[in-house]
Amino acid sequence: MAYSRRRKVRPQQPDAISPRPFVGMVLIATAFFPYAASGLLAPWWAVVLLVLVWLAFLVVACAWWTPHPDRLPWLGVGALVLWFALMNAGGAFLGWTA
């Protein structure tokens, strides 16, 4: 019995880590810069509101990290699209100029 044959068992591989939540967080972090630099076009009160909106995006991204990791890239893209839309709307309807 000292030399009994044993089946070789592969160790269990953990599931591969998805890059999607990391891409989403990078997009959220990237979106901070246009939101913070909006003072070049928008008045101070609009910049404060925009930074609060960005903080809300960050909180949602942190909350969705584990339960909904596939949504984070879309959230990051949505943050950038919303900033672009708000800047254009402010320029068109509120007269924000550089």
Image (cartoon, helix red, strand yellow):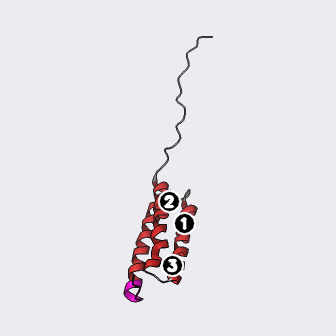
**What type is the residue that disc 2 sits on?**
Met
Instruction: Compare residues 20 and 46 and report the one nearer the observer.
Output: 46
Number of other residues with Cα within 10 Å of mark 1, as a class: few under 14, some 14 to 19, many 20 or more: some
Q: Which quadrant does the C terminus fall into?
A: bottom left
Element type where label 3 sits in the image: helix
Residue under circle 1? 58
Residue 75 drawn above or below residue 5: below
* Residue 2 x, y percent position in the rendering: 62, 10
Number of other residues with Cα within 10 Å of mark 3, as a class: few under 14, some 14 to 19, many 20 or more: some
Of mark 1 and mark 3, the one earlier in the sequence is 3
Of mark 3 and mark 2, the one earlier in the sequence is 2
Q: In the rendered structure, are the residues bearing label 3 and label 2 in contact, judged by CB atoms less than 8 Å apart?
A: no
Residue positioned 47% across, 50% down in the render: 18
Question: Of all residues shown, which one is farthest toward the top?
Answer: 2
Of mark 1 and mark 2, the one earlier in the sequence is 2
Which disc is residue 25 wearing? Answer: 2
Instruction: Compare residues 74 and 15 and report the one nearer the observer.
Output: 74
**What type is the residue that disc 1 sits on?**
Leu
Residue positioned 46% across, 67% down in the render: 31
Q: Give the magenta range.
A: 90-98
Which disc is residue 47 wearing? Answer: 3
Which disc is residue 91 wearing? Answer: none
Residue 8 drawn above or below residue 87: above
Q: Which quadrant does the N terminus fall into?
A: top right
Say which quarter of the image contains residue 60.
bottom right
